[in-house]
């Protein structure tokens, strides 16, 4: 499984003044996906970007765009993000009044559907959506800001969700976002994650290609 782990650099940590170049470096440096964190200033305390930037990134890369909607009422904006080029659209369990309906809408639009849960949310709340999703995202920090430290104990939640996935018999990606670097990645992968979102550790203070290579080496 460790050879099949995908690395999804979080564009939120990139230098937006040089976004085209940094996206290209991530793609040429071995990234598997690009992770796009969309924040609305309501569901989380920060604001990032919307479909316009997603569309601009889509024009610069062939990598799958993994769009993480940290927004209220995400069902209102699914079509916009799909039209902009999102290949995977992930919504938060905590933000959806009708989660199954929202997941179904994502799939009707032709995208892969993901569901994210915050650190304080029980994995048991995912039990009734497992047959519908393509991806589960475990937040290992409280969403809203980059550069936070990995919350200890997140590995337990990853193991719990991995067991839930195995029981379905379906191929469901298990993604982890928050504080992922060469120090935390090995334990996260051992716990069962197969998609690692990393922002600060890839885009800040390192040569991007080397940072991706170092992260990949850390869990093999």
Image: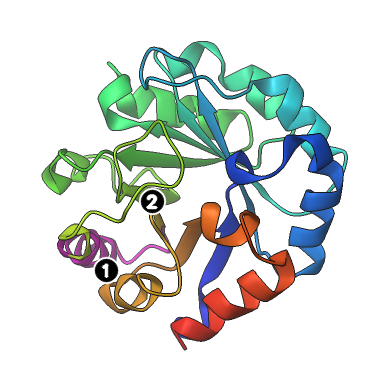
Find residue 145 and name its label. Answer: none
Decide: few, some or many residues near mark 2? Use Cα within 10 Å; few <14, some 14-19, many ≥20.
many
Is residue 91 located in the magenta-colored stretch of the structure? no
Q: Residue at x 38, y 12 (%)?
A: 42
In this rendering, the answer to whether 140 lies above or below 220 is above
Spatial CA distance of label 1 from label 2 is: 24 Å
Disc tally is 2
Left or right of 133 on screen, residue 214: right
Residue 50 point in image, percent of width and height = 64, 20
220 or 25: nearer the viewer:
25
Residue 157 point in image, percent of width and height = 18, 57
Which residues are the magenta region?
Answer: 156-174
Q: Residue at x 62, y 28 (%)?
A: 109
Give the mark toward the camera: 1 or 2: 2
Residue 125 point in image, percent of width and height = 16, 39
Residue 157 visible to the viewer? no
* Marked residue nearer the N-terminal end (1 or 2): 1
Quadrant of the snapshot with the N terminus: bottom left
Residue 140 point in image, percent of width and height = 30, 51
Disc 1, SS: helix
Q: Residue at x 76, y 69 (%)?
A: 29
Q: Quadrant of residue 179?
A: bottom left
Left or right of 147 on screen, residue 88: right
Decide: few, some or many residues near mark 1? Use Cα within 10 Å; few <14, some 14-19, many ≥20.
few
Find residue 178 and name its label. Answer: 2
Dominant SS in magenta: helix
Is residue 170 located in the magenta-colored stretch of the structure? yes
In this rendering, the answer to whether 80 lies above or below 6 is above
Find residue 166 and name its label. Answer: 1
């Amino acid at each position: 499984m460790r050879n099949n782990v995908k690395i999804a650099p979080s564009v939120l940590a990139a230098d937006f003044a040089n976004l085209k170049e940094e996206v290209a470096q991530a793609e040429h440096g071995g990234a598997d996906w690009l992770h796009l964190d969309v924040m609305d200033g309501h569901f989380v305390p920060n604001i990032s970007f919307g479909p316009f930037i997603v569309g601009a990134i889509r024009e610069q890369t062939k990598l799958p765009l993994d769009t993480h909607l940290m927004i209220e009422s995400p069902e209102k904006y699914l079509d916009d993000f799909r039209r902009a080029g999102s290949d995977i659209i992930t919504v938060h369990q905590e933000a959806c009044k009708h989660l199954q309906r929202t997941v179904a809408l994502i799939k009707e639009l032709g995208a892969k559907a993901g569901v994210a849960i915050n650190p304080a949310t029980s994995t048991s709340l995912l039990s009734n959506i497992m047959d519908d999703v393509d991806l589960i995202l475990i937040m290992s920090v409280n969403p809203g800001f980059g550069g936070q430290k990995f919350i200890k104990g997140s590995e337990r939640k990853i193991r719990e969700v991995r067991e839930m996935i195995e029981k379905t018999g379906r191929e469901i990606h298990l993604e982890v976002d928050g504080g992922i670097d060469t120090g935390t990645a090995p334990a996260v992968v051992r716990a069962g994650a197969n998609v690692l979102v990393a922002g600060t550790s890839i885009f800040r203070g390192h040569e991007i290609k080397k940072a991706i290579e170092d992260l990949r080496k850390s869990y093999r």
